[in-house]
Amino acid sequence: MEDKNTTGKRYSDEDLEMFRQLILKKLEKAREDMKVLMDSVNGSDGNDVLDTSPSIILVEEGQSTQFKEENSRLAGRLQKYIKSLEGALIRIENKTYGICRETGELIPKERLMSVPNATLSYNAKINEKKKK
């Protein structure tokens, strides 16, 4: 595997710690959100139709199914986000965090502050989208 970080540059240990703290906060929030979503998908959030009159149950069950399907999709996206944040923590430990996987250059701090799981610089991301 070729090391694309030919510049030898990386973020300082202080910067990496700042990013680690940011990622840990986002990871905690994402995991809390995942628990809420999974509770609603599994019906353990207390929102069921057991105490509803029979004339409305069919409508509510249909809406409930649609709601659960949408939450399942959201949970899938959230799980992917959690995995990418966990990957960012590994890159911090390896001291490779913030290095664009395409160019080997440092991803600007501003981008990492808004998208802490980024592995591409903004320009590399735009070029990747153009290729698709």
Image (spheres, rainbow, N blue to C red):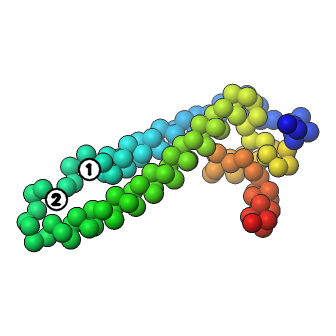
Secondary structure under tag 1 reads loop
In the picture of the structure, the residue carrying the numbered disc 2 is 49
Q: List x then y, in percent, for residue 40.
A: 31, 51
In the picture of the structure, the residue carrying the numbered disc 1 is 43
How crowded pointer 2 is (Cα within 10 Å; few <14, some 14-19, many 20+) is rated as some
Judged from this view, the residue extending furthest toward the right is: 6
Q: Residue at x 47, y 44 (%)?
A: 30
Q: List x then y, in percent, for residue 49.
A: 16, 59
Left or right: 42 in relation to 22: left
Q: List x then y, in percent, for residue 32.
A: 41, 42
Whether residue 110 is visible here, answered yes or no, is no
Badge 1 amino acid: Gly
Left or right: 99 in relation to 44: right
Question: Which corner quadrant holds the C terminus?
Answer: bottom right
How crowded pointer 1 is (Cα within 10 Å; few <14, some 14-19, many 20+) is rated as few
Badge 2 amino acid: Val
